[in-house]
Image (cartoon, rainbow, N blue to C red):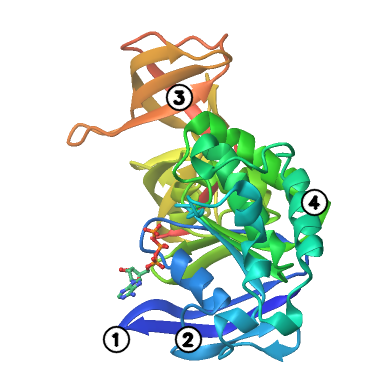
Amino acid sequence: MEIRIDKIRKEFDRFPALHDVSLSIRSGELIALLGPSGSGKTTLLRLVAGLERPTTGRIFFGQEDASWKPVQERNVGFVFQHYALFRHMTILDNIAFGLTVRPRATRPPKQEIRRRALELLDMVQLTGLEKRYPNQLSGGQRQRVALARAMAIEPRVLLLDEPFGALDAKVRKELRKWLREFHDRTGHTTIFVTHDQEEALELADRVVVMSQGKIEQVGSSDDVYDRPNSPFVFSFIGDSVELPVTVSGGQVQYLGAPTGLRHDHEGEGKLFFRPRDAELVSEGDGISGRVTSARRLAGARIIELDVGDKANARPIEIEVPLDATAERGSVVKFRPLREKVFAA
Ligand code: ATP
């Protein structure tokens, strides 16, 4: 199911939680809404679900204007962070719940409901556990039951709000992989909310980066990581170093010295690069810094540098190959290999 979000604005008591947000989601896409707390991710998801009404703007499911459709007519499946499975029901009854509460006219016969619930149990790889109760499952297993339950109504769209938020890091990682495979098998249009950039980059076909009620960038993981289009996206997705620079005659200068980088927008700016995209150079232009410490990781060395001037210290970190040498106290020079300059 294709979803088109068209200039949605959402106010809560005049507080704008979303400002004219537009987004088109293709059928079968796995989309991550990524952003810091309060950026509007959950509000956008709730609007798609029909749990909130837009102040202005519209939402289309396919050709149909669904903006004012009640939640039960949208045919969406949800999973929230705090999976609320019914404690007094078996796993199978939990999964079947959405079907058993349907009005009689559209409710499948009992045997059919059971068959479908068992099929879903198999799909989330929990066959054999149908008679257990939620408290007899692990957190990761419960979350898979929650997904199966959301799928039981054969939703057109799956909406997941921090689905793995409450689980420990190892289980999260496993479930991430599992969800990607599950999605590839079932092909549901899926939107999930996360504030974990690693989760978004690893899982999503496209990542929607949000900040303060606006979409900052929409793109593949490579787009938002390698080609961020704003200082916010650069620093939110992955580690970054930010330095104030001046562009003069096409040359990027830091503290009045040429960095060896070029840019076409003259004037004050901000230089961004990833710590691992820096190369130590022995001659020519570059950014100089005094080594304050160095430590080794499994496959690289992290050098802490002070690139400030006499008046202000400015500590940064860069990552270099293991064979690079950087004595503490020495002055080294480096050049970013891939960088982005934004006008200040
Ligand atoms: P988090 O990661 O913390 O869940 P989020 O990105 O999902 O954050 P939202 O929950 O969408 O953010 O909230 C966006 C803004 O709207 C916040 O400033 C929040 O306080 C506000 N907001 C959300 N729901 C309501 C509500 N029912 N009434 C008033 N303000 C609300």
Task: Mark 3 vs mark 1: give the one in front.
Answer: 1
Q: CA distance from mark 3 to mark 1?
A: 51 Å
The yes-or-no answer for disc 4 within 8 Å of ligand 1 is no
Task: Mark 2 vs mark 3: give the one in front.
Answer: 2
Q: CA distance from mark 1 to mark 2?
A: 13 Å
Point out the tag, 4 or 3, that comes first from the N-terminus. Answer: 4
Residue type at numbered disc 3: Lys
Residue type at numbered disc 4: Glu
* Image quadrant assignment for residue 111: bottom right
In the picture of the structure, the residue carrying the numbered disc 3 is: 333
Residue type at numbered disc 2: Pro
Q: Are marks 2 and 3 in contact (CB under 8 Å)?
A: no
Indicate the quadrant containing the C terminus: top left, top right, bottom left or bottom right. Answer: bottom left
Q: Which mark is residue 119?
A: 4
Give the image location of residue 323, x and y in percent: 57, 8
In the picture of the structure, the residue carrying the numbered disc 1 is: 14
In the picture of the structure, the residue carrying the numbered disc 2 is: 54
Point out the tag, 1 or 4, that comes first from the N-terminus. Answer: 1
**Is 332 on the left or on the right of 96, as rendered?**
left
Q: Nearer the viewer, residue 268 or 209?
A: 209
